[in-house]
Amino acid sequence: MEHVAFAFMMSRRGLVAAAVVSVFAISLAERGYPGAERMVPAAFLLVFITVLGYGIAGRPLAHRLGLAKDNPQGFVFVGAHDWALELARTLNSIGLPILLIDRNRDNTRRARMAGVGTQTADALDEHLLDALDLSQYTRLVALTPNDELNSLICLRYADEFGRNEVYQLPFSNDRGTREGVSIDHRGRFFPDGETTYSRLSEMFRNGAKVKVNTLTPQFDFEALLHSNGLVVPLLVLKQDGSVALFTDQSRPSVSEGDRVVSVVLASPLVEGGPARAPDSDEGAEPEGVADATVDT
């Protein structure tokens, strides 16, 4: 209903009137009516004032109707498999809007049951963008197991989100580093250059969890990274509500009070499975993590 109200209030007015006035002004001027020559300029002045008014009032009106936000920080995830859903649920729990896109109806059904926004579709469908309301979302992350598909998705959505806000998992190790692939032909590698789909899947199979840690003077970012176990930071939710992602080429600045979202595995991975971390109990939370963590 809000969309209808906004469209009604922002609909074009004056163009038809200006065209009709132009026709009548010529006829009236030929018949000698005084002031007829001023009708066309007056009509176009009215159109200009209307357009100016819509430009000034459009954004506040959209906010009042709940159709726009000042600083949207949502994510579009392509891929709704198990650990993508866990990540989406965690980000939802801290107030970040999430949309999961997947062709698999079972995956999207589970996501909907978990309270996460979904779209059952092919992310490369040329008509999909027309069907989506992306006003809440600032960035896209391609999380499928197919490297080439992830790159194509990032290229497809680069115009919508901006080239700096489309991300994908790094290329799988068994396919080489592909250093020759330009950033212009793929998304930014998230969360680093080594944590591939296969590695993340292995971590979650061995009990990894998505954790949210609030940084304090006693438990800063370095303490989080050096906790017992394996910690892969994904993003930082700043105190001002903005979000910054970790990539292979950038590490966001963090400060006290920021919240860091990470994948945490209590025992580091080694060939053949997880190894017991030194000086820690098997299956225990990394030291210093549990007290400042929100589980999902």
Image (tube, rainbow, N blue to C red):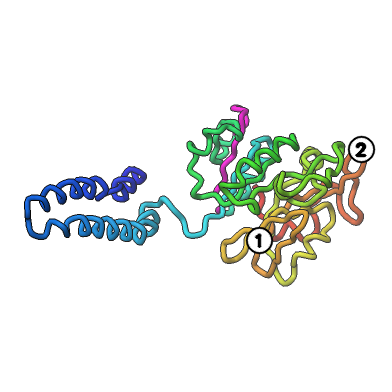
**Residue at mark 2 to residue at mark 1: CA–CA distance:** 33 Å
Count of numbered marks: 2
Residue 79: image quadrant is top right
Residue at 85%, 37% in the rendered image:
175
Q: Indicate the position of residue 189 as horizontal and vertical percent values.
A: 74, 49
Q: Residue at x 12, y 53 (%)?
A: 29
Secondary-structure class at tag 1: strand
Q: Which residues are magenta?
A: 95-110
Q: Residue at x 29, y 50 (%)?
A: 9
Which residue corresponds to mark 1?
A: 259
Specify the amino acid type for callout 1.
Arg
Q: Nearer the viewer, residue 233 or 164?
A: 164
Task: Inspect the magenta stretch and tell me whether residue 168 lies in it.
Answer: no
**Which class describes the residues within 10 Å of circle 2: few (<14), some (14-19), or many (20+)?**
few
Query: x and y percent of residue 91 in the render?
Result: 61, 50
Residue 272 is labelled as: 2
